[in-house]
């Protein structure tokens, strides 16, 4: 066999094997969720600059979350004790003297009453209630809106979707007018959609965001709406949603997907 | 505490531009979002990864196998690799091309890591006894692609890289030469060695020979 013939034969061999491989590259059910998880994790790893793998991070998260919670609870308890002691001392001072206390205040923002903390959330999600006999305020009670939002995102990235849902909903309930609460509508919508398989609740979140002011995540919210409607099987509404996306964001990264879906639904 | 995309400020025009080539490449739809991602805009990073990830799964599955248990981990490694690699990306190709190359490399690395003696043995045992009765064509195809995967894990790095670009990504010789920064003849030589190795594996696989004979 000549060199050229040998080359031709080898090329044919490689092409045959490559064609076989190509069949393995086909998309599979569940790819959307796999991709969503991978993107979340990759962003977290790149942002943190860490080199831990997925499983390492999950192990770390499992160990770290209780520790962080314990520290927060202990801190809250300590602050409550300090506050109580200070209050008693001020009462004693007032009793002894008509002069008002004038030192620097140690007071923290008042804790959310347990009744408020347990109130049903606006989206109607089934969120496990806080333990009724909680001796101290819940760990996230005194967090600011940005801190609570960051905590919820961190929890979500660490693979605790149920806990993240509670935190997002707590944010929306406690700081309903904050920019973070508005942004959380999209984050929570994606969480319901991609991780929890609940397109109904996802749609409620996206709808609320879209109904609000023109936010910076409007494009993402419109995409989320369309995907949620797709999973709900509401074909007419889904078409409208994709059209709304294309009208508002013709250069969207999801434009091709929207167009393809519209053709498919036609 | 790490921050997430939604409240991250958008860095509109910070830092020098990536050098994307003129001509068709200038319309790379991902160039702008890649530039922002490179500059640390987490919102852009997320959008970039969401845009490229669906295109990275096929080469990963082709190299690792469609049901490989570590597909998700390797995809994450590839996505992190893309973000970190943006700093040195000079626009010699589209962003998607670049990302697919990163993914291919990560998949080959993963293959190499996991080719322990135990796995090889297990795989050999699986090859000896194909459980469900399958058509001969399917069996031949399965064995050929497994040989190709094994080769990707066993060949020297440069040969494996060239073979993956050719067989998995469908690159031409010129494209492989551009991507790897070596002359075309070097690429040709690497591919020839890789193909010879594939031929040798197939020739020395007795049961595959039998199957091919039965089909002829």
Image (cartoon, helix red, strand yellow):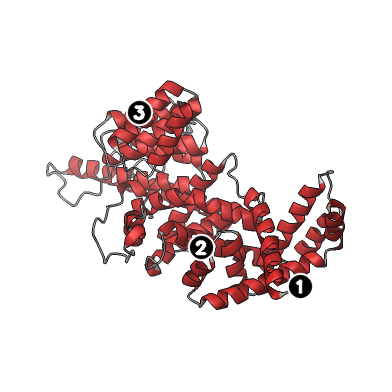
- Residue B13 lies, in percent from the top left, at 23, 59
Residue to which mark 3 is pinned: A207
Front residue of A185/A78: it is A185
Front label number (1 vs 2): 1
* Residue B216 left/right relative to A189: right
Front residue of A98/A208: it is A208
What chain letter is assigned to the residue under label 2? B
Q: Residues within 10 Å of mark 3 (few under 14, many from 20)?
A: some
What chain letter is assigned to the residue under label 1? A
Gap in angstroms between the C-alphas marked 3 and 2? 39 Å
* Residue A227 left/right relative to A1: left
The residue sitting at 30% across, 39% down in the picture is A249
Q: Secondary structure at mark 3?
A: helix
Gap in angstroms between the C-alphas marked 3 and 1? 69 Å
Front residue of B23/A43: it is B23
Query: Which dot marks residue B101?
Result: 2
């Amino acid at each position: 066999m000549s060199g050229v013939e040998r080359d031709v034969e080898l090329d044919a061999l490689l092409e045959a094997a490559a064609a076989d491989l190509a069949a393995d590259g086909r998309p599979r059910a569940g790819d959307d969720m796999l991709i969503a998880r991978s993107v979340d994790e990759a962003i977290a790893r790149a942002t943190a600059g860490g080199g831990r793998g997925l499983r390492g991070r999950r192990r770390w998260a499992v160990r770290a979350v209780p520790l962080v919670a314990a520290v927060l609870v202990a801190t809250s308890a300590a602050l409550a004790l300090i506050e109580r002691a200070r209050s008693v001392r001020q009462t004693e001072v007032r009793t002894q003297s008509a002069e008002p206390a004038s030192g620097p205040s140690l007071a923290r923002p008042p804790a959310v009453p347990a009744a408020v903390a347990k109130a049903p959330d606006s989206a109607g999600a089934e969120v496990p209630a806080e333990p009724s006999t909680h001796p101290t305020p819940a760990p996230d009670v005194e967090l600011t809106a940005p801190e609570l939002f960051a905590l919820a995102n961190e929890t979500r990235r660490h693979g605790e979707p149920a806990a993240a849902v509670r935190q997002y909903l707590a944010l929306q309930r406690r700081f309903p007018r904050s920019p973070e609460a508005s942004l959380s509508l999209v984050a929570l919508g994606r969480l319901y959609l991609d991780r929890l398989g609940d397109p109904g609740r996802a749609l409620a979140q996206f709808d609320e965001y879209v109904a609000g002011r023109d936010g910076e995540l409007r494009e993402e919210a419109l995409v989320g709406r369309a995907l949620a409607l797709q999973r709900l099987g509401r074909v007419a509404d889904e078409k409208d949603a994709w059209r709304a996306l294309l009208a508002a964001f013709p250069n969207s990264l999801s434009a091709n997907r929207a167009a393809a879906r519209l053709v498919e639904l036609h | 505490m790490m921050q997430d995309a939604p409240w991250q400020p958008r860095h509109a025009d910070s830092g020098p531009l990536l050098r994307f080539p003129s001509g068709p490449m200038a319309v790379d739809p991902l160039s702008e979002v890649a530039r922002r991602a490179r500059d640390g805009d987490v919102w852009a990073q997320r959008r970039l990864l969401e845009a490229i990830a669906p295109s990275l799964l096929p080469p990963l599955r082709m190299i690792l196998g469609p049901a490989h248990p570590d597909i998700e981990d390797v995809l994450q490694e590839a996505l992190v690799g893309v973000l970190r690699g943006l700093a040195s990306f000079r626009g010699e190709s589209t962003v998607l091309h670049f990302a697919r190359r990163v993914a291919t490399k990560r998949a080959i690395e993963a293959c190499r890591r996991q080719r322990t003696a135990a796995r090889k043995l297990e795989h050999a045992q699986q090859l000896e006894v194909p459980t469900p009765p399958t058509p001969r064509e399917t069996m031949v195809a399965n064995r050929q692609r497994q040989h190709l995967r094994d080769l990707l894990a066993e060949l020297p790095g440069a040969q494996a890289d060239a073979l993956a670009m050719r067989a998995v990504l469908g690159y031409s010789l010129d494209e492989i030469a551009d991507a790897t920064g070596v002359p075309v003849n070097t690429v040709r030589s690497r591919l020839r060695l890789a193909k010879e190795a594939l031929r040798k594996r197939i020739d020395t696989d007795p049961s595959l020979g039998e199957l091919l004979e039965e089909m002829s």
